[in-house]
């Protein structure tokens, strides 16, 4: 983004004092665009100007030449509109260093001092106008460390806009894939890596569109990281957070480096980071990114929120609740007691209809407290934010009142734990006017009577301005010029304006200041005296209001932990009441979650599809460890196989979130992972075909699935040749059915009807099919899952529905009849290699030379046995024997 250090060193020698300041800022932040404050503008120079002008569509100009005689490229943006331009740059992946004037130019002795006060990057953008309310903004750090003879990778994720800090780590052979899953799940806006970290070790990282920032390796040292964390959190060790410096060195170094980076770039108090949450995989139901995509949890088929599970069940009323529900869906619980606590809370809110409605009504008045507090702590807030914060916490007493009759342990603890910070709320209300300006520097935010000095300054300013108004009347009378006006501008201050026709009447004590087209402007000693009083008072008023506002912000910062605790409680109440609302509206029921194996879903429905269907057909899903742990599901395309798979997974996931589920009744076992291979996908960027992606995802399932896992496989093997596909599908199903270590609950949807034979030879394998019926050569989809195997696939009928030409359909029927005739001629056993005569003397799809058995079978198929006499039959038998002997 900038010329070489040698160029800057040479240019700095002959630069102006202000440009020397710019060079110092650029040297400190060479990889950022420097917004250099000069008066009312932020200016950019050299390559920064060229890049910014192109990205922001600004006019590129130049300023005085440098020491080489070359004009310096320059562009700028007004300082009052800088946030919009800054957000546009950051969303394009740039980092921006704000170099501010850190002293009042009017009071500065010589050059105004300038310093970089904040660095904004994709992972540290906090401006509410440019964030999505219901989505987090995570910055992630990765770090490596050795433990117990193996390398572990630590992962830390921080949301600067809310103060969330999560850490975890992964070890063993699968650590790289686990980190890749974490990256896909968290979707960080920016990634922080040590200089010696090899990004190619993490699958897909180099192809991912995540801006990467590298830091010196010493920042990731265990001693430095431990000191950074303990000092910030005010603790002597990290054991209280479940972290041991030996066993969890990777997690600690990642978290410590992340906090160090935030401190260096924000140059502000980070006290809203009050704790860190150490997560382990055993605490949550693991859903890998491909499964998340296949199940359409957060995004629908088109990549938007529409058509997703979260869009269907999200009835939260606050931004905090919306983000929390998203987090719950991303990491469903895997601890029985914790799940039951949530379900009991939702159950009470379903039954206490009036209480739920009242709570939700009050919650509509709660703004985004998490982000409001963060902006106060970071020093980017305004008076309106504090009033909004006060209004939000002011709802807590009413929420307590509505929740006083709730008895579920989780709800009771949440309501009792709410702190309305009444002392702070009262202080904000008594200090700020009801409708303050957005920024404190605009003035008028502080109430009269709050501060004696401010009141006196306002009185002086008002008196001076009244005096100036009186002076205008007095001068009109003294000069006889009725059109005389006293006006003000920022260049000259107050002045007297007289039109050309009245210049002869101007008194001698008027001092000419400026000639304009229609007259002239004058000043007088009396006017300048009033001006000095008025402007001096106005300037001091703004300074004093800013001081008082900063004092109030300090009080908010001191109470930040209390506010955050209440914000978290309100968010949880919002999510639980929203789940209760959704359950009531959608006729969901409470699942019975247990610690065994059996999964029983009676009359299950897909939470999204049922909303788009006038008559959704519910279905059961039953798994039993001894007799039914792998279901082979056959049936026609469009019959509902994929929907059945997805709804089973959605029901299990929702139960682990703590939500009621779309069933008549359900027993859901604690599940460690959900694997879903549903639908085709490829990865063009990584040069992987649909079949390669399918095989990689299937391999992961076979390696990682356990008896507590739920596996959903749809049409495995269809991406390759028929023989290969059938062989792979058979082997995969057989592995899942017979692997004594695992035997996960598996739904295996397939068009390979041969797989139904597994039920005849393997315990625990059963056949189900999606029912369909023919009517007048058309197909009717019943969408009902029934026991037994499907007798046919109805592919030609589906092709007709899709609009294939009649001639093509007719030809397909001919080919199918030939294939089926050949199969019957060989006893009806599928062998995929048969010679098939398809009419007009053509060979079939699977080429091989005919055998005597094929010819004899063809003759037998044509016989009309009931019309033959015994003699004719005996003669035929002799002929057939002779043909076989030949």
Image (cartoon, rainbow, N blue to C red):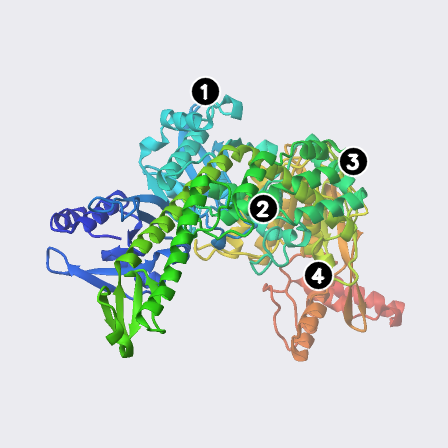
* Residue identifier under label 1: 236
Cα–Cα span, label 2 and label 1: 32 Å
Name the mark on residue 57: none
Residue 165 shows in this picture: no
Quote the CA–CA distance across marks 4 and 1. 93 Å
Nearer to us of marks 2 and 4 is 2
Q: Name the residue under label 4.
A: 884
- Residue 336, image x and y in percent? 69, 32
- Image: 235 above or below 357: above
What is the x, y in percent for residue 269?
42, 36
N-term mark: 3 or 4: 3
Left or right of 560 in this view: 111: left
Query: Marks 2 and 3, Cα distance to the nearest angstrom?
Result: 27 Å
Choose mark 3 or mark 4, whichever is in front.
3
Q: Tell which of 261 and 487 is nearer to you.
A: 487
Residue 548: x percent and y percent?
44, 41
Q: Nearer the viewer, mark 4 or mark 1?
A: 1
Residue lying at 45% horizontally and 42% vertically, measured from the top left: 549
Q: Where is residue 167 in the image (x, y as percent from the top left)?
A: 49, 34
Q: Is residue 843 above or below residue 270?
A: below
User: How many marks can you see?
Assistant: 4
Q: Distance between the residues labelled 2 and 4?
A: 76 Å
């Amino acid at each position: 983004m900038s010329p070489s250090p040698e160029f800057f060193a040479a240019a700095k020698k002959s630069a102006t004092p202000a440009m020397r300041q710019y060079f110092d800022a650029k040297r400190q932040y060479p990889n950022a665009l420097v917004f250099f404050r000069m008066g009312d503008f932020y200016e950019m120079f050299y390559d920064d100007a060229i890049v910014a002008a192109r990205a922001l569509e600004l006019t590129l100009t130049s300023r005085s030449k440098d020491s080489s005689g070359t004009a310096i490229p320059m562009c700028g943006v007004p300082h009052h509109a800088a946030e919009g331009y800054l957000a546009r740059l950051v969303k394009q992946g740039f980092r921006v260093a704000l170099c501010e004037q850190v002293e009042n130019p009017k009071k500065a002795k010589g050059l105004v001092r300038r310093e970089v006060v904040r660095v904004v990057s994709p992972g540290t953008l906090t401006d509410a106008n440019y964030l999505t309310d219901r989505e987090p903004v995570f910055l992630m750090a990765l770090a490596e460390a050795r433990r117990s003879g193996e390398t572990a990778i630590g992962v830390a994720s921080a949301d600067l806009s809310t103060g969330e800090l999560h850490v975890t780590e992964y070890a063993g052979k699968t650590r790289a894939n686990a980190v890749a899953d974490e990256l896909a799940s968290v979707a960080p806006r920016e990634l922080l890596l040590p200089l010696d970290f090899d990004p190619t070790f993490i699958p897909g990282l180099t192809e991912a569109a995540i801006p990467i920032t590298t830091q010196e390796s010493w920042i990731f040292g265990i001693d430095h990281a431990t000191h950074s964390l303990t000092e910030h959190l005010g603790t002597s060790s990290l054991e209280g957070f479940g972290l041991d410096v030996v066993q969890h060195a990777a997690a600690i170094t990642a978290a410590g480096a992340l906090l160090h980076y935030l401190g260096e770039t924000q140059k502000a108090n980070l006290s809203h980071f009050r704790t860190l949450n150490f997560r382990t995989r055993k605490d949550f139901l693991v859903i890998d990114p491909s499964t998340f995509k296949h199940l359409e949890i957060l995004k629908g088929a088109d990549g938007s929120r529409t058509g997703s599970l979260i869009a269907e069940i999200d009835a939260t009323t606050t931004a905090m609740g919306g983000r929390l529900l998203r987090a719950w869906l991303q990491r469903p619980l895997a601890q029985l007691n914790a799940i039951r606590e949530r379900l009991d809370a939702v159950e009470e809110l379903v039954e206490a209809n009036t209480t739920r409605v009242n709570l939700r009504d009050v919650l509509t008045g709660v703004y985004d407290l998490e982000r409001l507090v963060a902006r106060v702590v970071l020093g980017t807030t305004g008076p309106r934010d504090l009033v909004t914060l006060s209004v939000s916490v002011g709802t807590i007493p009413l929420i307590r009142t509505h929740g006083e009759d709730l008895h579920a342990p989780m709800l009771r603890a949440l309501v009792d734990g709410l702190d309305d910070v009444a002392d702070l709320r009262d202080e904000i209300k008594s200090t700020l006017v009801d409708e303050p300006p957005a920024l404190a520097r605009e003035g008028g935010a502080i109430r009269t009577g709050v501060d004696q000095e401010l009141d006196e300054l306002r009185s002086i300013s008002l008196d001076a301005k009244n005096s100036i108004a009186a002076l205008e009347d007095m001068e009109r009378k003294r000069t006889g010029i009725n059109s005389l006006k006293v006006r003000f501008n920022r260049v000259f201050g107050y002045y007297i304006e007289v039109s050309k026709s009245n210049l002869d009447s101007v008194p001698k004590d008027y001092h000419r200041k400026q000639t304009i087209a229609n007259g002239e402007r004058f000043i007088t000693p009396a006017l300048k005296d009033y001006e000095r009083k008025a402007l001096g008072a106005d300037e001091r008023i703004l300074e004093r209001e800013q001081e008082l506002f900063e004092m109030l912000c300090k009080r908010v910062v001191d109470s930040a932990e209390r506010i955050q605790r209440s914000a978290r409680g309100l968010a949880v109440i919002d999510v639980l009441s929203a789940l209760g609302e959704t359950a009531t509206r959608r006729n969901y029921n409470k699942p019975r979650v247990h610690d065994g194996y059996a999964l029983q879903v009676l009359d299950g429905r897909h939470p999204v599809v049922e909303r788009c269907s006038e008559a959704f057909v519910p279905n059961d899903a039953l798994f039993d460890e001894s007799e039914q742990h792998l279901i082979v599901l056959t049936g026609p395309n469009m019959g509902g196989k994929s929907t059945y798979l997805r709804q089973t997974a959605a029901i299990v996931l929702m139960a682990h979130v703590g939500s009621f589920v779309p069933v008549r009744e359900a027993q859901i076992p604690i599940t460690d992972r959900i694997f879903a291979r549903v639908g085709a996908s490829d990865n063009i960027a990584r040069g992987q075909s649909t079949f390669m992606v399918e095989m990689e995802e299937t391999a992961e399932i076979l390696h990682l699935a356990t008896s507590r896992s739920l596996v959903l496989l749809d049409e495995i093997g269809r991406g390759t040749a028929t023989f290969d596909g059938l062989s792979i599908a058979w082997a995969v199903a057989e592995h899942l059915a017979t692997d004594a270590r695992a035997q996960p609950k598996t739904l295996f949807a397939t068009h390979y009807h041969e797989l139904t034979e597994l039920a005849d030879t393997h315990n625990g394998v059963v056949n189900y099919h999606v029912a369909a019926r023919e009517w007048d050569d058309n197909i009717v989809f019943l969408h009902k899952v029934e026991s037994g195997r499907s007798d046919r696939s109805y592919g030609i009928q589906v092709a007709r529905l899709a609009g294939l030409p009649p001639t093509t359909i007719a030809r397909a029927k001919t080919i199918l009849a030939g294939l089926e005739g050949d199969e019957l001629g060989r006893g009806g056993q599928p062998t995929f290699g048969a010679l098939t005569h398809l009419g007009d003397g053509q060979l079939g799809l699977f080429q091989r030379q005919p055998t005597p058995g094929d010819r004899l079978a063809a003759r037998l198929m044509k016989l009309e046995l009931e019309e033959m006499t015994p003699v004719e039959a005996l003669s035929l038998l002799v002929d057939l024997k002779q043909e076989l002997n030949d």
